[in-house]
């Protein structure tokens, strides 16, 4: 299993892996916001956590459709499915998701403090947003795995995957943003939404791979 | 060890391609599946590999070595696609499959020697020619041990010399007590394999390869 993780990480880091594309897309979204809402620094600071979360969500969706399709195109997926006697297919899916998160989503989390400066956010808000992104984005990848597995047989499934999974990621967005606001605005709680965010991630760590494995099994032809 | 298929039926998209198919192979025996395009050769191989659901019937492996009780766990599948990543080198690709499949048989370097690719293991897979890609993919069968080889048009893209070398590799595998099932249009250079002729209309019969004129 470690070998699969290392292979997928290596693929993600080499040319065509899409890591840089994700960061650039994230940067582009955040960079156009001040042009859209105007140069009101207070307003930018207030909507900062939400904009970072929306940007990270969209940038995460960007490469998700290739999660299984690349393996299907070169025939590796057949061998991964055949190995389900040795390794449970859901475990294989989980490892692929982890590798995808490490190479495509973790860089977004790392870049988010810098982009927070663009939005004139206070240091505490930047810290809280980065922390909630770190905890919440795995859930987006794991939900996305289900969409990617369902659409794996479709030649142009990219947009479809986003449309399928975007509604499912809304709870992650709600609790991620409310936890980030909870850290800076006094009456709002931080711990409760943050714990729910963790719970959502753990929940989809179990459900996501199982559902994706079932979809992959039935899509083999 | 004995691979037995009983009353097997299979199809694609709800349409039955073949039915009532029976065969039995013991270790050291090879089966060649022949027939016109669309007769269901690849479908049969994918059913044996567990990648497609069979419509009816049973496949089982009697007296399998420990760890290979389940048919799909006992199979190496070489399909039309090579299952290699173009941006990784040939060695990286093979080392990954060896670690992932487990039960290491021979080292990656030895396997590359056997398929005459010893000097280009460091190149990215994308740089290889069609025949070299096929040979790299044949090396995948050698690095991890599986008693049953399922081969779908294994010699596609290979030149005459490589075909003969591949026939040698298959004979070695059979000598070691393995089973080879190959869908092919060309004689693969095996000694006296069983032949399964699949007709386009679901008609199936078996015969010995020798009997063919």
Image: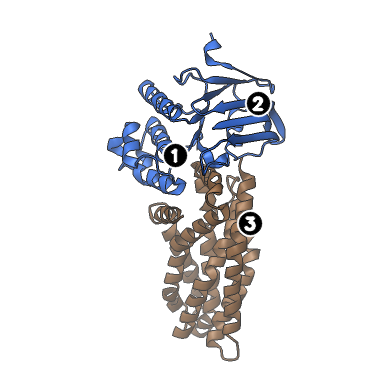
Chain colours: A brown, B blue
Residue B141 sits in which quadrant?
A: top left
Residue A161 seen in render: no
Residue located at (57% from left, 57% from top): A145
Residue that carries the numbered disc 3 in the rendered image:
A211
Asked which secondary structure carries label 1, the reply is loop
Q: Chain of mark 2?
A: B
Q: Chain of mark 3?
A: A
The residue furthest top is: B213
Between label 3 and label 2, give the one nearer the viewer. Answer: 2
Disc nearer the start of the sequence (1/2): 2
Q: Is residue A187 above or below residue B170?
A: below
Q: Chain of mark 1?
A: B
Residue that carries the numbered disc 2 in the rendered image:
B22
Residue that carries the numbered disc 1 in the rendered image:
B145
Q: Spatial distance from mark 3 to mark 2, Cα to Cα?
A: 35 Å
Q: Work out which quarter of the rendered image holds the N terminus of chain B and state it.
A: top right
Q: Spatial distance from mark 3 to mark 1, Cα to Cα?
A: 31 Å
Rendering coords of residue A170 (x, y %): 63, 69
Q: Check whether the beta carbons of the residues at disc 3 and disc 1 lie within 8 A of each other.
A: no
Q: Residues within 10 Å of mark 2 (few under 14, many from 20)?
A: some
Q: Are marks 1 and 2 on the same chain?
A: yes
Residue A219 seen in render: yes
The residue furthest left is: B119
Residue located at (56% from left, 27% from top): B25
Asked which secondary structure carries label 2, the reply is strand
């Amino acid at each position: 299993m470690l070998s699969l993780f290392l292979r997928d990480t290596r693929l993600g880091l080499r040319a065509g892996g899409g890591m840089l594309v994700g960061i650039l897309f994230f940067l582009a979204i955040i960079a156009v916001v001040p042009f859209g809402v105007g140069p009101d620094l207070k307003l930018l600071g207030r909507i900062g956590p939400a904009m970072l979360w929306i940007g990270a969500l969209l940038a995460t969706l960007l490469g998700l459709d290739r999660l299984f399709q690349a393996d299907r195109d070169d025939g590796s997926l057949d061998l991964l499915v055949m190995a389900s006697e040795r390794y449970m297919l859901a475990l294989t899916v989980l490892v692929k998701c982890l590798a995808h998160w490490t190479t495509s989503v973790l860089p977004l989390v790392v870049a988010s403090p810098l982009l927070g400066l663009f939005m004139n956010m206070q240091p505490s808000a930047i810290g809280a947003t980065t922390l909630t992104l770190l905890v919440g984005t795995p859930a987006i990848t794991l939900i996305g795995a289900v969409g990617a597995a369902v659409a794996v047989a479709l030649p142009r499934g990219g947009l479809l995957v986003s449309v399928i999974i975007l509604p499912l990621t809304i709870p992650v967005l709600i609790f991620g943003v409310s936890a980030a606001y909870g850290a800076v605005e006094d009456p709002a709680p931080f711990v409760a939404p943050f714990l729910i965010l963790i719970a959502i991630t753990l929940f989809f760590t179990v459900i996501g791979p199982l559902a994706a494995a079932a979809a992959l099994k039935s899509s083999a032809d | 060890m004995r691979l037995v298929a009983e009353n097997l039926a299979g199809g694609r998209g709800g349409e039955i391609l073949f039915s009532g198919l029976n065969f039995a192979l013991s270790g050291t025996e090879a089966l060649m599946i022949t027939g016109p395009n669309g007769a269901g050769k690849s479908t049969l191989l994918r059913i044996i590999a567990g990648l497609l659901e069979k419509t009816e019937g049973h496949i089982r492996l009697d007296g399998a070595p420990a760890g290979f009780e389940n048919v799909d766990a006992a199979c190496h599948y070489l399909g039309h696609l090579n299952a290699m990543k173009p941006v990784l080198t040939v060695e990286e690709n093979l080392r990954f499959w060896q670690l992932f499949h487990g039960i290491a048989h021979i080292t990656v370097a030895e396997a590359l020697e056997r398929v005459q690719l010893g000097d280009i293991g460091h190149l990215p897979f994308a740089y290889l020619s069609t025949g070299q890609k096929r040979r790299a993919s044949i090396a995948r069968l050698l690095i991890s041990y599986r008693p049953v080889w399922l081969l779908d048009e294994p010699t596609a893209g290979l030149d005459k010399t490589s075909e003969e070398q591949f026939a040698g590799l298959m004979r070695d595998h059979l000598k070691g007590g393995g089973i080879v099932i190959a869908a092919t249009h060309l004689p693969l250079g095996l000694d006296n394999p069983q032949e399964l002729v699949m007709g386009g209309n679901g008609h199936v019969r078996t015969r010995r390869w020798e009997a063919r004129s």
